[in-house]
Amino acid sequence: MATLDFPLTETKVVEQTPGITLTDGAIRRVRALIQEKQVPGAALRVYVSGGGCSGMQYGMGLEPDPRATDIRYKFDDVQVVIDPNSMEYLSGMTIDYVDDLMGGGFKIDNPQAVSSCGCGHSFKTEEASQAGSADSCC
């Protein structure tokens, strides 16, 4: 019989697992954003919503009060929270932060995306590709 290592009323915190990866650059940027926005202890919320050029789009924001149902990942002192519905589309992703001559921004590498928009903010999964949808870019 299996036992649980955590009470059912608490959210399990997953220590850096293959499910989600945050690069050192992304960790530094999230820390800086938390300081700039003055929300100590906030987590980075990553989510997926419908819409976007390729059918689904990524979203991110600072989350001061994660939900009990969120899946949590911890990278040093930075937490990432993802709702279970979004996790279905984001498992295996890597989040990086790039800062170059064209400007800075978060970059998501999602192995579940079979195609993405040229702007990098939306994507299509295998299921959506089979169903068919518009492929224009923002």
Image (tube, helix red, strand yellow):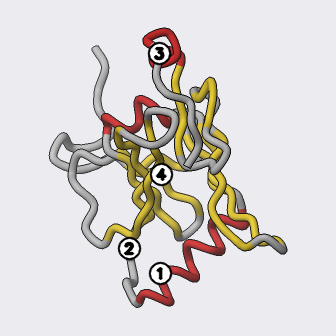
Instruction: Write the residue at 40% across / 43% down.
Output: 48
Q: What type is the residue that disc 3 sits on?
A: Gly
Circle 2 or circle 3, nearest the eye: 3
Q: What type is the residue that disc 2 sits on?
A: Ala
| The disc label shown at residue 34, or none | 1
Secondary element type, mark 1: helix
| The disc label shown at residue 111, or none | none
Relative vertical location of residue 128 with respect to residue 17 in this rendering, above or below: above
Q: What type is the residue that disc 4 sits on?
A: Tyr
How many C-alpha atoms fall within 10 Å of the one at disc 4: few (<14), some, or many (≥20)?
Answer: many
Name which quarter of the figure residue 56 lies in: top left
How many C-alpha atoms fall within 10 Å of the one at disc 3: few (<14), some, or many (≥20)?
Answer: few
Taking the image as shown, residue 138 lies to the left or right of residue 80, namely right
Circle 2 or circle 4, nearest the eye: 2
Secondary element type, mark 4: strand
Taking the image as shown, residue 23 lies to the left or right of residue 68, namely right
Which one is in front, 84 or 2?
Answer: 84
Q: CA distance from mark 2 to mark 4?
A: 13 Å
Relative vertical location of residue 123 with respect to residue 2 in this rendering, above or below: below
Dots 2, 1 in contact, CB < 8 A: yes
Give the mark nearer the N terminus: 2 vs 3: 2
Secondary element type, mark 2: loop
| The disc label shown at residue 132, or none | 3
Taking the image as shown, residue 18 lies to the left or right of residue 104, namely left
Residue that numbered label 4 is attached to: 73
Which one is in front, 138 or 45?
Answer: 138
Residue 14, how many percent across, how many down? 46, 46
Residue that numbered label 2 is attached to: 42
Q: CA distance from mark 2 to mark 3?
A: 38 Å
Instruction: Write the residue at 66% across / 54% down.
Output: 107
